[in-house]
Image: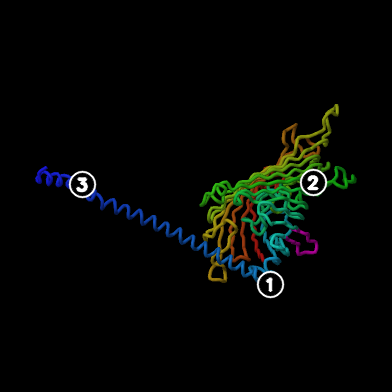
Amino acid sequence: MTPAICVSCTLLVGFLCASPSQAAGQTGPTQTADQQTADQQTADQQKAKDQDKSKAKKKDQAKAKDAQKAEDKHGFVWKDRPSLRFGKNFRMDFRLKIQVDFLSTPDPTVVDEPALDMNRRRFGIKGSVLQGLEYEVEHDLRSDGEWRDVYLNVAYLPYAQAQGGKFKIPFSYEELTGPTDLDFIYRTRVVDALACGRGVGAMAHGKVLKKAITYQVGYFQDDGDNAPSLEPTYPNEPLPADARGPALAGRVAVAPFRAAGTKGLLKTLEVGFSAVSTDDVPEGPNHLKGQSITGYHFFPRQYLTSGKRFRQGFEFVWTPGALGVKAEYLTSTETRVGVGVGTPEQLDNTLPDLVGSGWYVSGTWVVTGEKKDGGIEPRKPLFRGGFGAIEVGARYETLRFQSATADGPASTSRRSPTVLPNAEQAFTFGVSWYANKWIKVQLNGVHEQFDDPQRSPMPDRPGFWSTVCRLQFVL
């Protein structure tokens, strides 16, 4: 091969290798600029995430540091509330709850207008012993007051705990929410009518799969203090000594996206189911009742029931960021075994079941931006450089009582096969001001409407507005 041919081949190879590079160089600057912009956006997003993580980490570290300081202290400690502590082995927090309501309503059944009500005045203690035995004792601060929560919980294992004493029967998300943590002043009519309240019993409960599943199973001596006080069929007829039968209750709540390890807004979405079964309810006008926010009974206890009471509920809760969405559907079925007049041949005197049902849906928004999940804590509390937190919300609800099946004309006779149905619908608009972690002020406007005007507080006005303001102090 001659030198000339070698040089020619070398130049040809160099040209072919250089051409793609030059072509790439012609379009390179545009692609590089686009890539740089995308890279910068990604870097900015990552930086923001890192800053959020850093803030959250510092906040968690500060909480852990405060908790450690509290655990290391002995004697009197003030951390949000007065407390007695002896290291990690004993803690007794002193609790105080005061709620004052101011109600304005056209309802003529309300004696005082406007009505001022010291709705709740409770004092209690809550704490733990030996790092796993949790307790709570709470009582009303009035002469005729009642014991509220009085229980002991064995909490050494988060997935398997045992609780005994007097506490809320596990039924309905809203009922299990404390009165000082409600989004609106009044509980919904359906929860107020169909939920169980507190009962004496024992319960196994816990959280599994990274706290994505919560379960509660309990056995109680009756179906709670929200159940009707029993009355016999006839005034002078004595009730059996063990008139109220025991109740079996269960509830499970699942956060599916938390279980799947999903992060972000869907992590707080939770759905649940609960049920309570009560046997041997004695014969009498002992069914559940429906009442308005002022206490007017639009469906009073007047029908005879006997046998079994079964309640079930479905719940949906989602608190993405500053927003909150909640909904529930509850039903109760009460049998009427042997309370009818029977057929002419006296072959059957069991009447169709009495059914109560209802639902609600609510939405809230923390205008000042605080997170809804876990409770609202103002980022800038009053008297500490800020104004507190503001939340607005709206809720629609309905509650209805009727016979399971229609068997003849409806009547108010207590042995009627078909009860005369009635229902209430209510719309609530509310504004809540969280001044700080102890003080909350709420203002609600409530519009109530009844299907049967003749069984409403004002027969000439089946629907009307009421306004209520609440001042709350919690220590």
Residue 241, how many percent across, how many down?
88, 47
Marks 2 and 3, Cα distance to the nearest angstrom?
Answer: 90 Å
In the visual, does 395 lie left or right of 85? Answer: left
Residue type, mark 1 in image? His
Marks 2 and 1, Cα distance to the nearest angstrom?
Answer: 43 Å
Residue lying at the far front in this picture: please name it: 1
Residue lying at the far bottom in this picture: please name it: 75
Provide the residue designation for mark 2.
246
Q: Is residue 148 visible?
A: no
Residue 431, how many percent across, how many down?
58, 58
The local secondary structure at tag 2 comes to loop
Identify the residue shown where x is 63% and y is 47%: 253
Residue lying at the far top in this picture: please name it: 345
Q: Is residue 399 magenta?
A: no
Residue 214, how many percent across, how many down?
64, 49
Crowding near pointer 1: few (<14 within 10 Å), some, many (20+)?
some
Q: In the image shown, does 108 or 326 lie closer to the viewer?
A: 326
Q: Name the disc covering residue 74, or none.
A: 1
Which mark is first along the chain, 1 or 2? Answer: 1
Q: Determine which quarter of the picture holds residue 105.
A: bottom right
Residue type, mark 3 in image? Cys
Which mark is first along the chain, 3 or 1? Answer: 3
Provide the residue designation for mark 3.
17
The answer to whether the residue labelled 1 contacts the one labelled 3, judged by CB atoms less than 8 Å apart, is: no
* Camera-side mark, 2 or 3: 3
Magenta-highlighted residues:
135-150
The answer to whether the residue labelled 2 contacts the one labelled 1, judged by CB atoms less than 8 Å apart, is: no
* Camera-side mark, 1 or 3: 3
